[in-house]
Image (cartoon, helix red, strand yellow):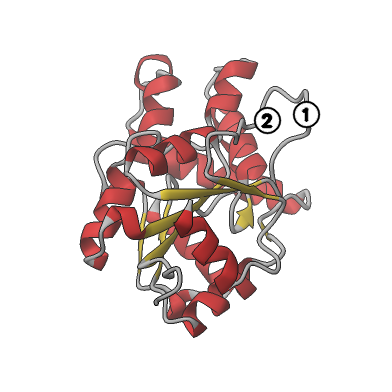
Amino acid sequence: MLGPMLPAAVLFDMDGTLVDSEAVYQQAITRYMASRGVELDARERNFVIGHAWQEIYAELRVAERVGVDLETMQAGSIAMRAELRAEGIDLTVLDGARELVSTLVELDVPVAVVSGSCRAELAEAIELLGIAEHLRMYLGSEDYPRGKPAPDGYLAAAVQLEVAPARCVVFEDSEAGIESGLAAGMRVVATAAANRPVGDPGRQDQRKAHRVVEGLERLDAAFLRAVMLG
């Protein structure tokens, strides 16, 4: 009798899941908007976490308040990263991220990234992680019509990988990302490694995920099989 099966593919979110970057991007967008005379309130700043560029652009009413298109906003916000980097605020790799990707490669489980960041930001993060050769593909905000919590990105990845959504495991950190994976019909693991402290308005409620883990360290084949079982 065969034991529990491994997933047919593992799909990772990037920001807050593989790299600690949510706060960096949040600050960059906040600074960009401030530079154009728009002060974001707490709700708007927190909306940035877990959402794709197209949703952020619409939610912050950038066209109306600033009068620029999405690409201009992206470029301006990315440029603000240089200021943050000079202040010592930059992306960091989360513990266990590289090791888990390596484990999946050893298990012959296809690995992909589905993110709300644009492809230029993804390329930077992938280089930092050093996992480019291990990825079958990656999708950024340009590659699907609706961002998380819509399932579009994850479903597009399943189609490109030629795997059934129900046989995929998603690793996420945000409420929007968890909802996206669930809406795609996939198994969802939430990692709390980069989540905000209890009481912080930016804290993400991860309880809807099938599993919640403290981080990505020491996750192995037995864990993945257990996730597929339910």
Looking at this view, is 82 or 181 the one in front?
181
Q: Given the current orientation, which residue lies at the most extreme front position?
A: 1
Residue 193 visible in the shown view = yes
Residue 70 in the figure: left or right of residue 82: left
| Residue 117 rendering spot, x and y as whole percentages | 45, 47
Which part of the image, by quadrant, shows the N terminus?
A: bottom left
Q: Residue at x 47, y 40 (%)?
A: 177
Looking at this view, is 23 or 199 the one in front?
199
Task: Find numbered disc 2 in the image and state the secondary structure of the residue it sits on.
Answer: loop
In the image, residue 74 above or below residue 94? above
Q: Residue at x 43, y 41 (%)?
A: 74
Q: Residue at x 64, y 67 (%)?
A: 219
Q: Which residue is mark 2?
A: 203
Dot 1 and dot 2 residues touching (CB under 8 Å): yes
| Residue 146 rendering spot, x and y as whole percentages | 29, 36
Q: Which residue is mark 1?
A: 198
Query: Within 10 Å of the Cα at label 2, are there few (<14), some (14-19), or many (20+) other Cα atoms?
Result: some
| Residue 136 rendering spot, x and y as whole percentages | 35, 73
